[in-house]
Image: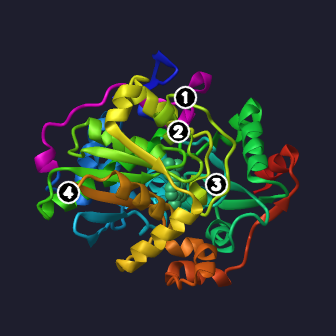
Amino acid sequence: MKFINTRNPNDTATFREAVLRGMAPGGGLWMPESLPVFEDWDSLLQLRWVERSEIILRRFIGVEFDQDALAAAISSALDFPIPLTQIRRGLYALELFHGPTLAFKDVGARFFAHILDLVREPGLPLTILTATSGDTGAAVAQAFWHRPAARVVVLYPKGRVSDLQERQFATLGDNVAALAVEGSFDDCQALVKECFDDAALSAKHGLTSANSINVARLLPQMLYYTEAVAQLHKQDVREGIVMAVPSGNFGNICAGLMAKQTGLPIRAFVAATNANATVPRYLDSGDYLPQPSIATISNAMDVGAPNNWERIQHLFGGDLYSLRQALRWGFKNDADTKRSIRELMGMGYLADPHAAVAYAVLEERLGLSETGVFLGTAHPAKFLPVYEPMGIQVPVPDSLESLRDRPLLSKDIPNNVAAVRQALENS
Ligand SMILES: *Cc1c(COP(=O)(O)O)cnc(C)c1O
């Protein structure tokens, strides 16, 4: 399958090229040139998770790889369960937080790390340079840790990520370096951009980005939507499935919409945001007005200018009418989010703040005879400061608890590109 530039349909790339280039020329994003419609969903949905995932990804990118190597990469990347938990009749949570860093970003980051062994130029250096405000750095750093294909350099704003988040990427060592920048997350992103813009530096270290615009993170995110539908089919739920996705950069829901276009039987998607409601407001009004981001308790969705929205526009040919047919939407503030956390607790389910936003919008948008699934994108233990003032005890999984005693290996650097350059030379 070919990939095309959202800003120039004449500009195409193989999957391998698209992964290594990250962004497409002119600021565009790579998308599959056209999405195949699969006629065999009934039998695909009867397969087991990893086997089904292999078959689907092979149809997208199989021609570029040795089949056994691709299968091995997929099965080791997707080696954790994706449970669908029933909350009440007609309502389920798809739990995407059973991977190593307890957030759905593990799916994309682990696939990216394993596929990179297959797409990279042998013998050339490769450095994943990434700025993080929390979850992305953790998922990417752990996905690449101890993998000889690449080293990872994570930039983060010193003192501005939570203690446990910091420990998820700054205690690893080996091929993972963490740089604590005297500045904000925006400063970190600007430093990363400066490094990529320096062609000589970029070539010397083989700088590659692992943010959510990389197609290697996008494609595998289609897979867990198939798993949700497969588990519902086992329970004889086949009609009227509606999926609610807590959205920030809109990469997750973009992958879901792609899966639907291949014929996966999902009736509709619900795009749920927090107060950063650029997309819901656009769907209401027809005016797309990106905003500076606002801080909320569902902080992984604090995005005012979602960088994958362009992909969704591309998927629908920029047609607002068909977007409004495929999507339902809404947004919730922090007070609503907390109310939803308590409401779900009343039904015996502890949701993270992002999942709670999705649940809240889903409840408003779900028809009576429909079955709703909201995505649990992170484990609640990643957000203890949200629950403490609410008086809610959150059990902390051992994998997170054990990080508390690990020493931080990060290096403090000033907020300038010379310091990053030096760290790239020395780490
Ligand atoms: C990244 C993230 C999101 C938002 O996902 P997008 O693909 O950016 O829309 C939602 N919840 C959690 C916990 C996240 O880490």
Q: Nearer the viewer, mark 3 or mark 1?
A: 1
Amino acid type indicated by mark 1: Asp
Q: Earlier in the sequence, mark 1 or mark 2?
A: 2
Secondary structure at badge 2 equals: helix
Q: Which mark is residue 85?
A: none
Q: Which mark is residue 287?
A: 1
Residue occupying image coordinates x 39% and y 79%: 346
Amino acid type indicated by mark 2: Arg
Q: Is residue 194 covered in magenta? A: no
Q: Which residue is mark 3?
A: 152
Q: Earlier in the sequence, mark 4 or mark 3?
A: 3
- What percent of the width, then of the height, locates residue 55? 23, 46
Total numbered circles: 4
Q: Is residue 15 visible?
A: yes
Q: Badge 3, how many Cα within 10 Å: few under 14, some, many 20+?
A: many
Q: Which residue is mark 4?
A: 230
- What percent of the width, then of the height, locates residue 92? 29, 65
Residue occupying image coordinates x 56% and y 30%: 288
Task: Quadrant for residue 307, please give it.
Answer: top right
Q: Which residue is mark 2?
A: 281
Quarter of the C terminus within the rendering: bottom right
